[in-house]
Amino acid sequence: MKRDWINLSLGAFVVLFFIFMLAPILIVVLVSFTSAGYVSFPIPGWSLKWFARIFEYQPFVDALIVSIEIAIGATILSCLIGVPAALYLARSRSRWASGVMTFLLSPLSMPMIVIGFASLFFLSWLGIGISFAALLITHTVVCLPYIVRTVAGVYSGLRPAYEEAAAILGANPLKTFWHVTLPLIRPGIMAGSLFSFLTSFDNLPISYFFGSSSTNTLPVVMLSYLENQFDPTIAALSTLQLLIAVVALLIVDRVYGIDKMTVAG
Amino acid sequence: MSDMTPQPTPPRPRRLLLPLFLALPAVVFLIVFFVAPLFDNGMRSILTQDGWTVSRYVSLLTDRFYLGIIGQTVLLSAGVTLISVVIGYPVAYFLVRKAGRFAGLIIFLLIAPLLTSIIMRTFGWQVLFARRGLVNTLLVDELGILSAPLRLTNSPEIAIAALVHVLVPFMVLSIATVLQGIDTRLEESAKILGANRLRTFWEVTLPLSLDGIGTGAILVFMIANGSFVTLVLLGGGLQTLPLMIYQQFNTTRDFGMASAMSMILLVIAVACLFAQLRLVRRKGA
C-alpha cells in the first residue's frame, strides 16, 4: 500500500510539472484565437483576425523575411564549414582533436549577449557594422556548433568499412564523399540544420545589437512591440512560430530519432 | 561488435585519416569572428582615450552597487539551478523508471517547449499573470477569493518561474541520461539487504546520479547567467549583469563599462565550461 502511495504522488507531481510546462505555451495559443481586442479571460469568441493582423503590420512581415533569410543563410554557411570539420574530428586520432572539438562547440557556452555586444563593435571596426552580412556572420558563430556536434555524432558511429569499400573499388575521395559519406551523414546534417535554423530563428540577444529597419529580425521586432503594446498579435505570431518548430521537430524525429539528441551538454 | 575483430587485410586506405585542413575553415572562422571580437572586447574594457586602466574592474569588484549586481546575477542563477534540480529530479526519475510506454510522450513534451520562442514563453507568463490575465480572472471573478486583481507581473517570483520553465528540461534530460545508465540490480540488492525505498534512494540511487545533476546544474547555471530576454520583460526589479549590459548599451552608452561587465560574465561562463569538461572527462575515464 505504501508503494502505491509513493508512486501515486510521484505521478501527480509529474502531471503538475507538465501543467507548469505547458500552461504558458497553451495560453498563448488560446489567446491568439481570441475575438476580443485585448488579452482577457474568458475568451469571448473565436477569430483569426490576429493572424491577419500579422501580415498587415509591415515591420512584422519585413522582419519575418529577414529572419528566414538569416536562419537559412547561417545554416548553409555553418554546413559548408562545419561538415568538413565534423568529419575530420569524428575520425581523427590526433590528440588535438578533442581540443579543437571543444573550441568549435564553445560558442554554445558563452553568453549570447556578450557575443552580440562584442561582435557589433568588432564588425563595425571591420567596416561591416550593422548589416545583413554582420548579422549572418554572427549567427553562424552560434549555429556552427549544432552542425559540428550532430554530424560528428552521426559520423563517429559509422563504420569506415563503407568508405573503404568504395575506395578499394576505385572511387576517388570526392566520389566516395558524394556517393557514400554524404548519404550516410545526411540524418546528422538534417538534424543539425534544423537545430541551427531554429536557434537562429529564435535568437534575440545577438540580433538585438544589429537592429535597423532593414536588419531587424522577428524576435527583435516582437520585443520592441511587446515593450509598448500588449495585444494578441504577439500571441498569433508566437503560435505561428510554434507551428514551425513542432513541424521541424516531427521531421527531425522521422529522420533522426528524438532519443539521439536529448542531452544538450 | 563483429566489426571490432582485426581484419585480415590491414592496409587501410590512408585517405581515411582525413586531412587536418578540413577543420581549418571552421577554426579560422571562429578565431576571426568569435575569439577576436571577445579579445577586442577585453581591450575595450581596459583602454581609455589616453592609455589603459583597470579602474572599471576595480569599481566592478569593489563598488557596493556593482558587487550587488554581480551577486544578484550569481544568486539568481544558483537559485534557478537549485529549483530546477528539486523539481527536475522527480520528473527524470519518473521518466526513466515509471513512464513505460509514456516515455516517448514525456520526452516530446520536454523537448517541444525548448523549440518555442523565448518571447512566446515570456508572453505566456505575462498573459497568465496580467491584471486581466487568467490567474486574476480566476481569483477575482470566478472564485471570488479576492476583491481586486493582484499586481503579479514584474515580480521577481514570476521572473524566476519563467527562467526555471525555460531551463528545467535541460536538467531533466541530463539527470535522465545518467539514471538510465544505473544498474537497477544495485537498488534491488539494497532492498534485499533490508533498506527501505527511501533509504535505497538516498544511499544508492541519488549518489549514483550525482553526475547527471552536476552536468545539468552547470548547463542550467551557464544559460541562466547569460539570460536577459526573460528579465527585460518580466524583470521585477532584478538587476543582473546581462540587464546592465543591455542598459549600458541603450541608455548610459558607457561602452567601456559594458565591455568590462561582459568580461566578468565571460569569466563565469569559461569557469562553467571548464567544470563541464572536467565532469565529462571524469565520466569518460
Image (cartoon, coloured by chain):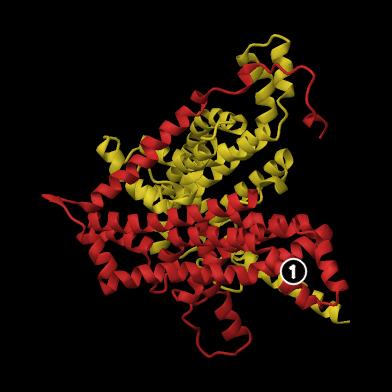
Chain colours: A yellow, B red
Report the chain holding disc 1: B
Quadrant for the N terminus of chain B in the image: top right
- Is residue B76 visible in the rendered image? The answer is yes
Residue at (69%, 73%) from the top-left corner? A16
Residue B273: give x, y in percent of width and height.
49, 52
User: Is A145 left or right of B16, judged from the image as shown?
Assistant: left
- Which element carries disc 1, helix, strand or loop? helix
Residue B105: give x, y in percent of width and height.
75, 57
The amino acid on which the numbered mark 1 sits, given as a three-letter code, is Val
From this view, report whether residue A251 is shown above or below residue B209: above
Disc 1: which residue: B204
Residue at (75%, 57%) from the top-left corner? B180
Q: Judge by depth and name the residue closer to the eye, B206 or B59.
A: B206
Q: Quadrant of residue A227?
A: bottom left
User: Most extreme residue toward the top, as rendered?
Assistant: A170
- Is residue A212 visible in the rendered image? The answer is no
Residue B168: give x, y in percent of width and height.
60, 63
From this view, report whether residue B228 is shown above or below residue A61: below
